[in-house]
Amino acid sequence: MANIIQARNLYKSYGKQAALTDVNLTIEQGEIVGVVGTNGAGKSTLLKSILGLTSATGELSVCGLNPRHQQAKMMEKVSFIADTAILPKWITPAQLFEYSQQVHPNFDIKLAEQFLARTNIKPNMKVKNMSKGMVTQLHLAIVIAIDSELLVLDEPTLGLDVIRRKSFYNSLLEDYFDDNNTIVITTHQIEEVEHILTRVIFIDNGQVLLDVQMQDFAEQFVQLTTHASNKAQVELFSPMHSTKVLDGLAYIFDMQKSDVSMEQLQQFGSTKTPNLADIFVALVEGKTAHKTQQEVTYA
């Protein structure tokens, strides 16, 4: 598979505050990658760098092009839906499709019209009269009709209800994605995209905490639920995180870093694969605890 995004030693700061620090990643054709982080974690800065909207030191290639110096050519291969999609309030889908056909060489107006016909949006309906969900569907119609190599989604379903969010991702998979396309998604609603991702990247304070293929996720991370009386014994295996639950204690283990087998853990209770949100919290809180411990040590 071709490399769609290649980043080496990316660094970006705003004043004295680092937004990205030594970010290295390669995203290949055919991947659906979730970029997860809290507000201010650096994920928006990473997306802006990928889209050529801000400069960062280091090396960055998107669809074989330099985003800063070849942005116009690059955007012929890239589509973008932002959390606050800005369209003129006066424009209609018919006008938008006509404009898109003029400015984008790969735009298929018939495909856009076919997708729109499956929604409640009328061709002559103005954007100002559309709901947030309708505007998102309109953007999705543009994306599908362009059939870009790379689709970047920044909190695309923010403000939508559960049904609309599910419908959006179903349409994305059914009408847009195949092995020739690549999707990069940032979202706070991790649980709603977890099932479609092929890979996840966690970012915190401008640094990549985790970059893992979803097919390897279940082998790397294990959650053990055990009785509180087992606390001392279980913690000898160096869990990465613990929390109280109704049945006792829940521990998360990184099996690549813990000197323990699945069979050993199962002697203390039930095991399962944790969800992405649990791992993100464990990594962020673990990083914070480690930093605090260092500050105390060197104080």
Image: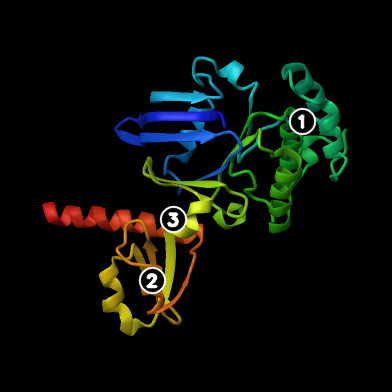
For the residue marked with disc 1, what is the amino acid?
A: Ala
**Real-space Cα separation, disc 2 to disc 1, in angstroms:** 47 Å
Measured from the top left, where is residue 49 in percent x and y? 48, 28
Name which residue lies at 63% across and 43% down.
Answer: 156
Which residue matches tag 1? Answer: 145
User: Does residue 257 appear to the left or right of 295 in the view shown?
Assistant: right
Residue 252 x %, y %: 39, 65
Disc 2 marks a residue whose amino acid type is Thr
Which quarter of the rendering shows the N terminus?
A: top right
User: Taking 103 as reference, is 82 left or right?
Assistant: left
What residue is pinned by disc 3?
280
Residue 23 falls in image quadrant: top left
Which element type, helix, strand or loop, lies under badge 3?
Answer: helix
Mark 3 is on which residue type? Answer: Phe
Furthest residue to the bottom?
Answer: 229
Look at the image and name its color scheme.
rainbow
